Structure formats: C-alpha cells, structure tokens
Amino acid sequence: MIDVVVVGLGPSGLAVLDAVQSMGATVLGVDKGRVCHHLKDFPADMIFFSTAEKLVLDGNTMGEGTGTNPNLGEALAYYEAFAERNKFPLLLDTNVVSIEGKDGDFTLRFSGGDLARARKVVLATGVYSTPILCDIPGENEANVSHYFPGKKGFMGKCILIVGGGNSAAEAAMELASHNDVTLVYRKDSFDTTRIKPWVLPVLETYIERGDVRAIMPGQTLSVSGGVGRIDGEEEVEEIPFDFCFLLTGHRPDRFFLEEGCGLVLEGPKEIPRHHKSLESSRKGIYVAGALVDGNDRRRIFIENGREHGVPIAQHIARALA
C-alpha cells in the first residue's frame, strides 16, 4: 500500500511528488511516457517566454539561471535532474487504465495487467494527450500533424496551418521567414482569449506585411493528397502544401477521466469538478496542473501549476493523520 500515487510526471506532477514526499508519505509516480514526455512534443527549438526562476521546482538552476529564458532542452534537463535528485520511485512507460476502490484503498490497473494500491491518487495528466480532431479526409496522412515540431528542417516549403489559437499563431510566425505559409481559421477574426496578448499584434503585423497569408473565415474541407480544400465562403480554394499542421487544440482524455477514474467533468470546457483543496468529485482523488481547468488553457501554466503541490500535500497530510 502506497500513501500517494501521482499519475502524470510533467512539472506539476513532479511538484506534487516533491511536496507529498517531503511530508513523509510514501509516493509513486506513474507516466505513460517518460518524465515530462508531453514537453517533448513542443517545438524542439522553443524558447520559454517565462524566465527560469518562474519554472523551477527547487533552488537549483535551470539553464543559465535567474532572469534568463531557458530553451526546451534546458528545461527538460532540469526536470529530469529534479526527479533524480529527489529519488522518486517511478513507473515510466506505464499506462493507467482505471482506478478502482475507494478513498484510503484504491487499486490502479495498468495496461500490462499489473496493479498498484494507494490511499490517495493525484491526477496531473495535463491536456495535451488527445488532439481535437477535425474529422476531415487526409487528417491521418504522413505529411499532416496535430503537433508542430519546430521550424528546424522546414525551408522553402508550402505550409498549411489550420487553427486560430496560440499554437497556430506561433507556428505561422516561426515558419514565415523561410516558407510560404497559409493560415486558415474558421472565424472572421481571432479570439483574443485564445492567443497571448503579446502574440496577437505581432501575428497581425505578419499578415499585414504578407509574410503570412490568412484565410478568415475559412472552413477546411479536406487535406488529402497534399492539397487543402478550403471553403472561404465565396469559393472553395485548393491550396497545395508540403506539410499541414492541424493546430486545432488538445483536450484531456475524457474517457479515462470519466470511465476510468469516475470523475465528473462539467461544461463545454470539461473541467473536473473539484474543491478548493483540489480534491475531485471522487473523494481521495485529486487533480493538479493544467487538468484543473479542463480544456481551458488560458489560466494554468507551468508557472502556477507548480504551486498545486503544497495545498494538495497539506490536505492529504490532514486526511492521513
């Protein structure tokens, strides 16, 4: 019997492990990939907007330290070293299928058939595991992706980007200098709640200069055979492309949360019902990190998601006592 199992080993999950282990409880961290594996889907050449001190989980240095903006490699190296420093017991490449039992005696079932028992469970599984599909022809072809790997390797290409959020905006701007970029968004103007306020004016400048061609509103009908068929209201246009990025967003794994874990998800944003303590609707199971806000990705980032560990640990300590 383990006191606390944390499912999901991104920065928020690591922060919970640290806080709970520091109070003397036995812990186990589980992830379907490696430590911070979801960050590895980010653009390889990404530079964090936030400075290092807003991303760290302890007093150790990330990258070049305070006041500097670390790149993705530096952040990953820090988080992996953090897990090693704290000697967390970890089960990696292990997928949790369901959580059975009740508060004080949960059984976690893994896809390989193994089991683990825990008094409390914390879900820090994030929101990037499940792309929001477009359900259009060509969506699964080799040169079409729901993830943008970064600008490296793209030079002199025709790029089609579908989406109107922050990921689509940043991908369009990163690729614009050396590629022919077309951005398609289903609305006639950008939703200011989906793009960071410092990104939108820069994107609009790219569009005004002609560095990025924008089709708005535009409905993407298909992306099959290297050709995007776009309904721009007045006519259907065919746009040849070398690569297409369907950056239409991601969502939590609803089936796992509802059917596998017994959580209640509320509203179109699929927010797990939870208390101020971050305990969910199912007593003894907590939510942490971006999962707290479901598929609303505007409020919780690494910078504040890392703060969830302490209140969860304090609530668990009182319950175990």
Image (cartoon, helix red, strand yellow):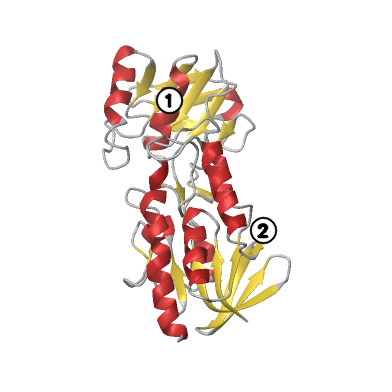
Residue occupying image coordinates x 63% and y 82%: 1
Q: Is residue 194 above or below residue 279?
A: above
Q: Is residue 84 above or below residue 21?
A: above
Q: Dot 2: few (<14), some (14–19), or many (≥20) neighbours within 10 Å?
A: some
Q: Quadrant of residue 149?
A: top right
Q: Is residue 46 above or below residue 41?
A: above
Residue 281 visible in this rendered orientation of the protein: no
Residue occupying image coordinates x 38% and y 15%: 211
Which of 8/131 is in front?
8
Q: Quadrant of residue 280?
A: bottom left
C-alpha distance separating marks 1 and 2: 34 Å
Which is closer to the viewer, label 1 or label 2?
A: 2
Residue occupying image coordinates x 52% and y 59%: 14
Tag 2 or tag 1, which sits nearer the N-term?
Answer: 2
Task: State the count of labels.
Answer: 2
Query: Which label is found at residue 172?
Result: 1
Residue 278 left/right relative to 254: left
Which of 164/310 is in front?
310
Residue 268 left/right relative to 35: left
Q: Disc 2 residue type? A: Leu
Picture coordinates of residue 163, whole percent (x, y): 41, 34
Q: Dot 1: few (<14), some (14–19), or many (≥20) neighbours within 10 Å?
A: many
Q: Disc 1 residue type? A: Ala
Which quadrant is home to the C terminus? Answer: bottom left
Judging from the image, what secondary structure is the residue with disc 1 in? Answer: helix
Residue 134 visible in this rendered orientation of the protein: yes
Picture coordinates of residue 279, whole percent (x, y): 40, 73
Judging from the image, what secondary structure is the residue with disc 2 in? Answer: loop
Residue to which mark 2 is pinned? 92
